[in-house]
Amino acid sequence: MSDQPRRPRRPAKPYRRPKKDPVRILAFEALRAVDERDAYANLVLPPLLRKARENEGPEKFDARDAALATELVYGTLRRQGTYDAVIAACVDRPLREVDPPVLDVLSLGAHQLLGTRIPTHAAVSATVELARVVLGDGRAKFVNAVLRKIAQDDLDGWLERVAPPYDEDPEDHLAVVHSHPRWVVSALWDSLGGGRAGVEELLRADNERPEVTLVARPGRATTDELLAEEAAVPGRWSPYAVRLTEGGEPGAVPAVAEGRAGVQDEGSQLVALALAAAPVEGPDRRWLDACAGPGGKAALLGALAAERGAVLLASEKQPHRAGLVAKALAGNPGPYQVVAADGTRPPWRPGSFDRVLVDVPCTGLGALRRRPEARWRRRPEDLDGFAPLQRGLLRTALESVRVGGVVGYATCSPHLAETRAVVGDLLKQFPDAELIDARPLLADVPDLGDGPDIQLWPHLHGTDAMYLALLRRKA
C-alpha cells in the first residue's frame, strides 16, 4: 500500500433538475412531428401554440413566446441543409448515425447561433437545457460540445468552410449557401432561364418568411373592412388582397372568422382572376373548379361567378377536402354546388362548362416559403408520380369545356416538367385547343415571362411561384 495520504474526495455536485423552457420544448415537438409523421409545420404549429396559450401555469405563454417559437421552427426547417453541413463538420460520425431527436436539438441550437440575434451564451445554454429535458444528461453533453464548436464562427465563416466554391460546382454551392436540395436548385434555375443573380434572388426569397395575405370575397367583405385591421396594407396586385405586414392571427379578423374573407396567397388570387377575365365565345353561365380543395380559389371564383349570374361547380376527390370547399363557399352570394368526385372520371357530361379551372396536385416547389419542409421531403422521382395525374386532369378539363370556352391549367410549382411540358403534351392530343395569351389579363403585373402562359415568382412578385396557362377550345 502507498504511504501517500489520500486526497479528500470532492463532494458530489448536487443534481440540478433541468429548467423547462416552454418555447423551445414546443419548437422541438413541432420539429419531431415534421420528422416522425411527415407533418407540415403550418398544420402542426397552430394547435401547439393554441394549447400553450391556454395553459394557466405561472409563466403565461404570450405573443412574444409564440413569435419566437414560430421563428425557431420555420427558421430551422428553412436552413436545414445549411445547418446539416455545419453540424456534419462538427461531429465525428456521419449525420445519418446521429439520432434524429439529437439532430433536431442541434439544428435548433445552430439556428439560434447562426440565424438569430440571440446571444451566443444564451443560445448554447438554452439549447443544452432543452437537451437535458428531452434527451437526458448524457446526450446533452454531446449537444454542448457540438454547439461550442459551431459557436466559434458566424454563418458567413461557416459557409466559406462547408460550401464548395461556386466556380467548381455552382449548383452545390447554391444548395449549401441557400439551403435547397441540389436538384431543386437545378430545376428552379432551368425554369428561370437566367443567370446566377436571378436564381440567388429566388433562393433567398424562398428563405424569407412570407406575409399573411387575406382575400376579401366579393359580395361578402371589402378590402376597406380588412384594411381597418392593425398593420394591414393593400395587396400588390389583386384588388381583393390585403397584407398583414406584422403577421398576426388571421382567425382573429372578424371577416375571416365569419368566412367572408380568407387567407389566400396573392398568386392564387391572380390565377382565379385571370381565368375569370379570359374572353369566352358565347354564353358564360357555368363554371367549374375541378380540383377545388381546400377551397380558396373556389370561394373567389364562386363570388366572381355570382356577380355575373353564373353558377360554380366545385369538385374535389377527397371527401374531407370537399368539406373544406363547402365551408369556404358557405354564404356565397350566388348559387353553387360542391361534389366529391374524381376529376379524371367526372360525373358531368363533356362540354358542360364555359370556364374550367384545374389547379393540379404537384410537388409544391412554388410554395417553399410557406412549407419549407417540402424541399427536403420531395424527390426528383416524385415528378414521375404526378405526371400521369396532371395530364389526366388537364385532359378531362379540356373535354369538360364547350367549344369557345376556356380552361385554366395551374400549378403551385414552376418546374418545367409540371408546367409547359404538361401543356405541350395535351396540345398535341387536342388539336382543337389553343393557348391564349394570359398576360394582358393581368396587365398591371410585370415580369410575367415570355408568354403566352404566366409564371409568378416570390422574388419578383412577392407571391408563391404559381403557373397558369389558358387554353381555348376551338370549333
Image (spheres, grey):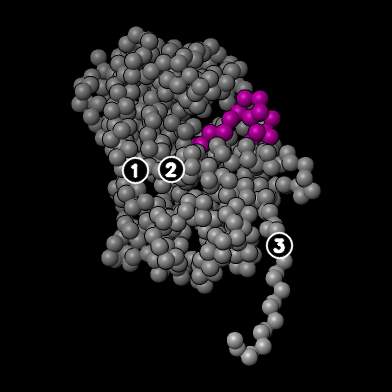
Q: Is residue 251 magenta?
A: yes
SS for dot 1: loop
Contact? badges 2 and 1 (CB < 8 Å): no
Q: Position of residue 329 (x, y in %)?
A: 55, 20
Whether residue 406 is visible, yes or no, is no
SS for dot 3: loop
Task: Tell me the quadrant of the picture where the C terminus can be found.
Answer: top left
Instruction: Name which quarter of the figure residue 242 lies in.
Output: top right
Q: Position of residue 25 (x, y in %)?
A: 62, 50
In the rendering, which numbered label is found on residue 379?
1
In the rendering, which numbered label is found on residue 374?
2
Q: Give the CA separation, mark 3 to mark 2.
A: 40 Å
Residue at x 51%, y 36% (from the top left corner): 265
In front: mark 1 or mark 3? 3
In front: mark 3 or mark 2? 3
- Magenta span of residues: 250-266
Whether residue 47 is visible, yes or no, is yes
Residue at x 46%, y 70% (from the top left corner): 157
**Residue indicated by mark 3:** 16
Task: Tell me the quadrant of the picture where the N terminus can be found.
Answer: bottom right
User: Between disc 1 and disc 3, whose residue precedes?
Assistant: 3
User: Between disc 2 and disc 1, whose residue precedes?
Assistant: 2
Q: Going by the picture, which residue comes out furthest to the top?
A: 349
Quick check: 287 above or below 4?
above
Quick check: 105 above or below 256?
below
Q: Position of residue 450 (x, y in %)?
A: 31, 41
Q: Give the CA separation, mark 2 to mark 1.
A: 10 Å
Query: How busy is the neighbourhood of tag 2: few (under 14 within 10 Å), some, or many (20 plus)?
Result: many
